[in-house]
Image: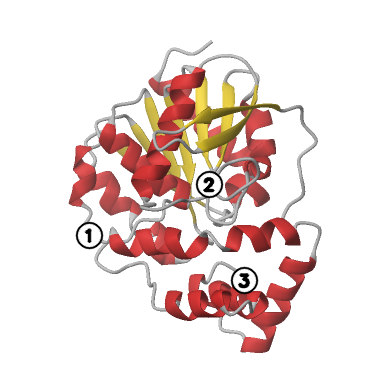
Amino acid sequence: MSGRAEIEWHDDVVTSADGTTIAFLSQGNGPGLVVIPGNNRRAHHYGVLARELSDTYAVHVIERRGRGLSGPQGPGYGVETEVDDAVAVMERTGSDLVFGHSYGGLTALHLGLRRRVAALMAYEPGVSVEGSFDTRWLPDFTRLLGEGRQVAAMAAFLRGTRLTPIGNAPTPVFRALAFMMLSGAEGRDMRAMMATAPAEIGEIGRLDSDGTRYAGIASPALLLGGEKTPGYLTGVLPRLAEVMPDARYVISRGLDHNAPDLNAPQAVAGQIRAFLRERLVTP
């Protein structure tokens, strides 16, 4: 995983609907754009993305629950809790543009069900359509995590999500990769964030549907994906674009699931900028 981008952040906090403190990092000037990070990601991982957009937009990246100065997931946690957090940041900053990545993309879609925004963008949202998102690995992951076996739990996560390039490698290979991830410079953060994963992945499974619920999103929307990502994440994009009344999808060559935060943030920022330039009157 990537290190912190060398960029000047301004930090702030808001109080969400249930009283939980939610931190966020900001930079730039212009129309407000709220970024909702993905699973096992913190706000600073989107530093390059924010920097690329900060000449035109005031970018506000949420530090989601269980991360940094933000409070815990709390009782009754669900996607709507994350929507409450995003709305609180939007209202504090006067923002009306939203971008979500992975689980943050699922949150962005449910925010779009609650209110119309000037533009809604999501990169490979964690949406399950008719069982497309396989969560059969989740009980094993949760059990290992509860037993304090974090390396084994992360190996189960990596094998289950198939988001690494090692494919169907033997279990020891996954465990070696998990050990490196949890022992590196960001290992402490990663270990802390792992505790939020069972509830988040559980929400993806709970919200499995035929996709028609997203027909209620009235905002102009851009759905992004990368050709290197497993099909269970990109395969739902055509369905979402079909049912959402004002949406398009783009699957880009050479990009993978971590394009917004790690591998190609400049390319994703360019797609965001082009969409907003087309759909909005921007500075």
Residue for point 58% across, 26% down: 59
Point out residue 105 in the picture as x, y percentages from the top left corner: 43, 46
Q: CA distance from mark 2 to mark 3?
A: 28 Å
Query: Badge 1, how many Cα within 10 Å: few under 14, some, many 20+?
Result: some
Quadrant in which the C terminus is drawn:
top right
Residue 252 shown left or right of residue 180 in the figure = left
Query: Badge 3, how many Cα within 10 Å: few under 14, some, many 20+?
Result: few
Kindly identify the amino acid type of the residue bearing the numbered disc 3: Pro
Residue for point 29% across, 27% down: 116
Residue 8 shown left or right of residue 56 in the figure = right
Contact flag, marks 2 and 3 (Cβ < 8 Å) = no
Residue for point 61% across, 15% down: 29
Marked residue nearer the N-terminal end (2 or 3): 2
> 275 and 45: which one is in front?
45
Occupied quadrant, residue 266 = top right
The residue where tag 1 is placed is 209
Marked residue nearer the N-terminal end (1 or 3): 3
Label 3: state its secondary structure.
Answer: loop
Point out residue 47 in the picture as x, y percentages from the top left corner: 68, 37
- Asked if one can make out residue 250 in the rendered structure from this viewpoint, the answer is no
The residue where tag 2 is placed is 65
Label 2: state its secondary structure.
Answer: loop
Kindly identify the amino acid type of the residue bearing the numbered disc 1: Ser
Point out residue 167 in the picture as x, y percentages from the top left corner: 57, 78
- Asked if one can make out residue 272 in the rendered structure from this viewpoint, the answer is yes
Kindly identify the amino acid type of the residue bearing the numbered disc 2: Arg
Q: Is residue 216 above or below residue 32?
A: below
Q: CA distance from mark 2 to mark 1?
A: 25 Å
Quadrant in which the N terminus is drawn:
bottom right
The residue where tag 3 is placed is 165
